[in-house]
Amino acid sequence: MSQTPIQDDDQSEDDAGAPPIPAGAKNYITPRGYALLKEEALQLLNRERPELVKVIAWAAANGDRSENADYIYGKRRLREIDRRIRFLTKRLDAAEVIDPAAREETDQVFFGATVTLLDADGNHSVFSIVGIDEADVSSGRISWVSPLARALLKHREGDQITFQAPGGNQMLEIVKVEYRELP
């Protein structure tokens, strides 16, 4: 007989599919990332949700709700919006905003660093270490809990690190570390 695991309050259905914050860790985020999460929450709360409630009320007034697609879809979408608002509220409440541009200059890699790397083939790549909710590898932003960021943290310019990439171990050299405002 299989049992369904009981979900922890910290990992509820509100954030299903979202990257988890490591246990005991803070939710580090840049000012830009915080502003984007807040903007999304306000958009959902002040615009999308009220407009959807109007549509649902209109659809409910049309009679039989069991076969009313506007009503059924509207209620489903309202649950999705409410779930996302709860998730964003939790993330914003737990956020610890760190401005990379305000950090003292150092050649050591910490949260908010923009790091230039050189691989064994002589290829350069640049990554900024950002919060979990603002990571976007295609834009060169990696989460501070990603394997690459963890391999880089606390190392300095000139250090060589071994990174366990999907294709096997990779040697990388830290060419440059800088702290700046992220676009």
Image: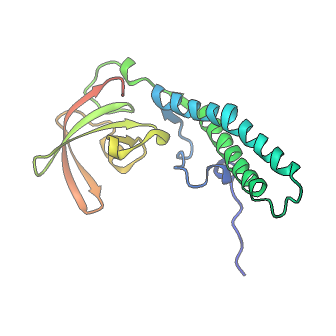
Nearer-the-camera pick, 106 or 134? 134
Residue under the image location 75 percent in, 59 percent down: 69
Which image quadrant is residue 112 in? Answer: top left
Residue under the image location 67 percent in, 33 percent down: 47
Figure colour scheme: rainbow
Q: Quadrant of the C terminus?
A: top left
109 lies left or right of 122: right
The image shows residue 91, relative to residue 169, as above or below, that is above
Task: Name the residue at the bottom extreme.
Answer: 1
Q: Where is residue 14 drawn, in percent x and y?
A: 66, 49
Residue under the image location 85 percent in, 58 percent down: 65
Nearer-the-camera pick, 150 or 129? 129
The image shows residue 12, relative to residue 4, as above or below, that is above
The image shows residue 168, relative to residue 27, as above or below, that is below
The image shows residue 135, relative to residue 36, as above or below, that is below
Residue under the image location 70 percent in, 78 percent down: 2
Q: Quadrant of the N terminus?
A: bottom right
Which image quadrant is residue 40 in? Answer: top right
- Tally the numbered discs: 0
Q: Where is residue 154 drawn, in percent x and y?
A: 32, 36
125 lies left or right of 13: left
Q: Where is residue 78 drawn, in percent x and y?
A: 72, 47
Task: Name the residue at the front extreme.
Answer: 62
